[in-house]
Image: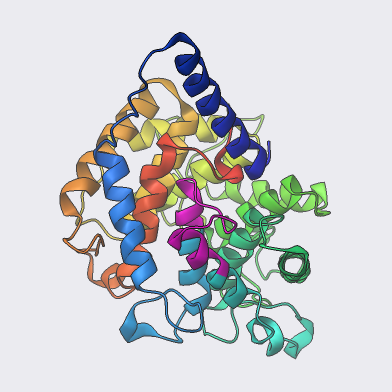
Amino acid sequence: MGFKSLLAGVCSVAFAWTAGAQLTGKTVQPRAPDKVDTACQRAVEFLMASQDGSGAINDADKRHAYNNPMTALSVMALAAIGNQPSDTTREGECMRRALQFLVRPATDRSSDAAGFPGYLGGDDSSRMYGHGITALALTEMLGMGIDKAQDRLIREKTQRAIDLTLRSQRVRKFDHRFTGGWRYTPESGDADLSVSVWHLMALRSAKNAGILVPKESIDLAVGYLRRSYESRRDAAGRPTDMKSGFAYTPGQGPTFAMVAAGLLAMQICGQYDAPEVIGAANWLREHPLTYSDRWFFYGIYYYAQGMHKRGGDFADLARRKTESLLLPKQEANGAWIAEDGQERGCGRVYCTALAVLSLSVKYHFLPIYQD
């Protein structure tokens, strides 16, 4: 189901409920916002206040550094709770300006070196992290432009970005374990899970939106994910450890952020009942996350979405844990900031956008996360 059709369905249900109440003479009482609704709206206010004159959304002290992925994450955060660029609201205006920033000519103009045109991580030094995140946001916004001209720009930019991701995956790796993955630059001969997951999600989102993505590319990426799962294998190639998870690179050992990232990536590729998915969910249940953990926001984002997809007790646990960790830590201005020093350096826009994406499982608007 597309983003527009999903929202139309929600609106039609709301309309029918209201109309039915009017026909019966009953008074309709709108549902009062709960604590998650309130926290997300406060966060959106912070993100909108962080937009500069160019349309970029970023911390004031980080202008021009990682502008593409920070703006992209913010666009996804606004969309994840039901905002659209076509809305006649401040949120809609913010998204329109942010999208125009992301499709500006300079985004990938400087990326023709080494035969990799379409690179979205070159002009702001965000490298392949930025490229994957920005490509994902653009694929999620396909068809959501304010007019045909912007829709065309989004599709053209997305197509070039996906073409680069596919070319980069085909670069010969110096170790077979890295085959199917991505790393810091388009021509990298190795791979890591942290970068690779963004590119895999962008490919899946693009495929869902009708952009040609070869099945082989998804299969190669899933193969890389499987090799990143830490376990011995039986004669049939199945992992024998059903309480383990994914590592940053094969053989490094599972960490919370990487286990959660691998879980969601496998599910997005349709591997809902793969032994690696079962094992990762079991591992996450037995390794509680704390706010001071390394790469907390990166990890809780994947954790919230991945465990929600797992369903049942896993989803209930993750929802409670996510809300209990995030809600008390929101600042007065609506933002979040990490306690882990390295992630803290990424700034409040990064932390706040990921916090909203983590809490947004209750809305489930973005197509990439829909079951």
Q: Position of residue 350 (x, y in %)?
A: 37, 66
Q: Position of residue 200 (x, y in %)?
A: 63, 54
Q: Is residue 321 above or below residue 289?
A: above
Query: Residue 257 or 7: which is nearer the viewer?
Result: 7
Residue at horizontal 54%, vertical 72%?
A: 97
Question: Residue lying furthest top in this view?
Answer: 24
Residue at horizontal 66%, vertical 75%?
A: 103
Residue at horizontal 35%, vertical 18%?
A: 27
| 84 within the magenta span | yes
In the picture provided, is 292 more to the left or to the right than 247?
Answer: left
Query: Residue 340 or 231: which is nearer the viewer?
Result: 340
Query: Residue 77 or 169: which is nearer the viewer?
Result: 77
In the picture provided, is 208 more to the left or to the right than 30?
Answer: right
Residue range corresponding to the magenta coloring = 76-96
Quarter of the figure with the N terminus = top right
Question: For residue 325, what is the image quadrant?
Answer: top left
Question: For residue 212, what is the image quadrant?
Answer: bottom right
Residue at horizontal 73%, vertical 77%?
A: 118
Q: Position of residue 318 (x, y in %)?
A: 33, 34
Query: Residue 167 or 176: which is nearer the viewer?
Result: 167
| 95 within the magenta span | yes
Asked whether residue 241 is in view, the answer is no
Q: How many marks?
A: 0
In the picture provided, is 342 more to the left or to the right than 98?
Answer: left
In the picture provided, is 88 more to the left or to the right than 356?
Answer: right
Q: Is residue 140 above or below residue 157?
A: above
Asked whether residue 332 is in view, the answer is yes
